[in-house]
Image: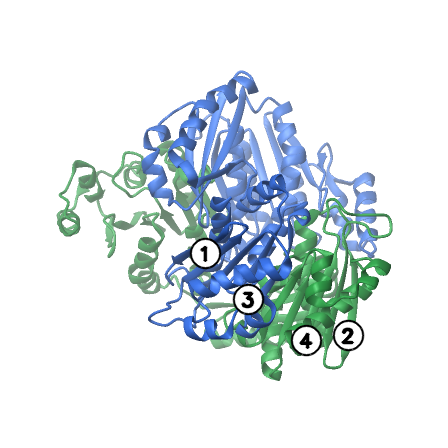
Chain colours: A blue, B green
Amino acid sequence: MSSPRSGCEILCIGTELLLGNILNGNARWLAESLASLGIPHFRQGVVGDNPERLREAVVEAAGRSRLLICTGGLGPTPDDLTTETLAACFGVPLEERPEVLADLEAKLRARGRSLGVSNRKQALLPQGAEVLPNPTGTAPGIIWTPQPGFTVLTFPGVPSEMRAMWQQTAVPWLKAQHLVSGTFRSRVLHFWGVSESSLAESVAPLLELSNPTVAPYAGQGEVKLRITAKGATASEADAVIAPVEQELRRIGAEHCFGADDDSLASVVLAELRARGETLAVAESCTGGGVGNALTGIPGSSDVFLGGVIAYANRIKQDLLQVPSELLEREGAVSAAVAQAMAEGARRQLGTDWGVAVTGVAGPGGGSDSKPVGLVHFAVAGPDGSSHLERRYGDRRGRDWIRGLSVGDALNLLRLRL
Amino acid sequence: MSSPRSGCEILCIGTELLLGNILNGNARWLAESLASLGIPHFRQGVVGDNPERLREAVVEAAGRSRLLICTGGLGPTPDDLTTETLAACFGVPLEERPEVLADLEAKLRARGRSLGVSNRKQALLPQGAEVLPNPTGTAPGIIWTPQPGFTVLTFPGVPSEMRAMWQQTAVPWLKAQHLVSGTFRSRVLHFWGVSESSLAESVAPLLELSNPTVAPYAGQGEVKLRITAKGATASEADAVIAPVEQELRRIGAEHCFGADDDSLASVVLAELRARGETLAVAESCTGGGVGNALTGIPGSSDVFLGGVIAYANRIKQDLLQVPSELLEREGAVSAAVAQAMAEGARRQLGTDWGVAVTGVAGPGGGSDSKPVGLVHFAVAGPDGSSHLERRYGDRRGRDWIRGLSVGDALNLLRLRL
């Protein structure tokens, strides 16, 4: 019935997933990472915090796969059962690891807390399992081969901890095990201002390639194309990627804003830094989202000086010097007010550039002439102002409109630069 | 090995899920719907568009579950294999359904297209399977009991089609089969300022209950407790929840800030709205994150007027009137500057309350006396100022420090109110 044992599967553990409380973002993230490493991944599973169900799922995986990646159930509470259930599956006792206990104590002490009984549980690992260190949180994972040809890796369910542990320890381990055969290299190109379907149509022949492969991913407003190549060496794989990247960039033209870890915020900051210029923001409907995106980039402070969150009209007047007659005549959501806000930010904060956003994020506040989803953007710079109007519609909701607005504001500035 | 056959599982079919191209929103949506119907749901699986893997997964489910809900693989293209693979699993032939074919032709005609060979495939269903009509798209699903005590329902992967079919046909069918027994209700309590492990210890006896169950979830800084109860009716289940909620709130005391859809931002805004008071922010290291969180809540504009993102010291002086000698003497990251910023926001923006954050988010910029992770908060209000200092450490990185800072800023204001 089963296929020969090979490949890899993912098992996410947590009743919150079965109750539909949260989206399974960990499975998606791991799947994307496995794909970029070129590790075949054939199956995903989800079980609750239930030892019997977890046991069934682990035994099945052990019978058909080389590698099982588990997330969740490593916390200190009684419903966190992953480690002890894994040990029981293979009839191996748990043992307290002094080095894990010491690490837990140090981490808790740094937070002004002492080691409780429930934390102590986190230092109990199956005999023979290797510790998979958790640099940020308390719960360590394990890398454990309980039977020949089957290895299980465990991670906490907290995404930031899981990701850090995956990158720092699991990926190097996978490479050392030669589970990554040949070398896969991948490069992600980022696009803004084009839909996934129209980008996919315009690059259709390239999506049929087998080495490198090209796959589109849609995010909120952003579209990514991942180019993945296999080669005997990294430089051979890179050489397979280069001409395809060049062709995709040519087709994507000004929509392509960067590669790999680039974000709209990081490319805008890098360009301004190279010019020795500074930036301020004036935000209404995004309420600080543009500033938040910019200051999310380490070292942003040499370019981004600050901004004004001008949610109320009075703040637009008082702090950004937007004329009250302009607000009355054109309304707060208008091209003229967006421009006055951008110029106000630039002037009041003494920067080279000002970016402004004003719109109707909804769900309330829309009208026939200014419906929910209407957003005006402006960029003021040394050589004058530019403006953009977007109508996102109201179907995708407030968060969607605000998220796209942050991206479009940064993209307008990027295209200006 | 297997548990007695009972309950329900979800199987999502699609290589795009294994490549991490998309989040598995269908699984989450179905899980939430099943939970609200009170149908025990024990497991989720994902396989690619691969008949061998799909077959394995179906055979496993048929051996342990009463009900299998499949999504994906019903389309017209060669990689859509769900219906024919299901038929093959149980050795049942496919037969063309004239009524499905007629429906397909009518739908395609309405779109100005004619029936192709690939569409014709969608009218082939296993002998004995009931049609699960698709009111919006072309692909119908099936409700099929290929062996006693095991029923499989299939849906397309397109979320809007799946949801419409679920609501219109599957839910009434589940009710008619008496698979909907009793009603599950759940309530989530939100906590801030307490760790998952210490909260879990303090409520430990309640985590052992069976109806309702209580389960903790940790997020970034926030801890949640989910109370889930079963009852003959919704009100009976609610009555099971109420005393446990009361006890958890008593134990959690001031750490418990809300329930269900509440967030720190929403409860702060609701409290200020009830008082008829207004709020402004002054943000340095969070760079707009506090404003972003507040304006994420619909209707925030009657309370939150705006703020100043004072990333550079000059902006703290110019827009918030923080005295330059204070900045020089105490440094930007200090209790005194946080207080001056909060008072400046309140005064310059003319609000009842001002909240300020200034800190070292890292990775650079730390010193021995002011290490990465040191953040000062202040709240200025009608009755004076309050201050909070946090040392988050530098191990969890910039995003973590900024995220916790947003929560702690809002929580300081909440506790003041």
The residue pinned by badge 2 equals: B385
What's the distance in space between the residues labelled 3 and 1, CA to CA? 30 Å
Q: Which residue is drawn at 67% across and 39% down?
A: A87
Q: Which mark is on residue A81?
A: none
The residue pinned by badge 4 equals: B353
Q: Which of marks 1 and 4 is nearer the N terminus?
A: 1
Q: Mark 4 lies on which chain?
A: B
Circles 3 and 4, Cβ within 8 Å, touching? The answer is: no
Q: Is mark 1 on a helix, strand or loop?
A: helix
Q: What element carries label 2?
A: strand
Q: Residue at x 61, y 25 (%)?
A: A175
A293 or A143: nearer the viewer: A293
Circles 1 and 2, Cβ within 8 Å, touching? The answer is: no
Q: Give percent across and percent down for residue B305.
A: 58, 72
What's the distance in space between the residues labelled 3 and 4, CA to CA? 16 Å
What's the distance in space between the residues labelled 4 and 2, CA to CA? 10 Å
Nearer to us of marks 1 and 2 is 2
A274 or B200: nearer the viewer: A274
Q: Which of marks 1 and 2 is nearer the N terminus?
A: 1
Q: Which mark is on residue B295?
A: 3
Q: Is residue B135 visible?
A: yes
The residue pinned by badge 1 equals: B31
Q: Are marks 3 and 1 on the same chain?
A: yes
Amino acid residing under circle 4: Trp
Q: Give percent across and percent down for residue A226.
A: 46, 34
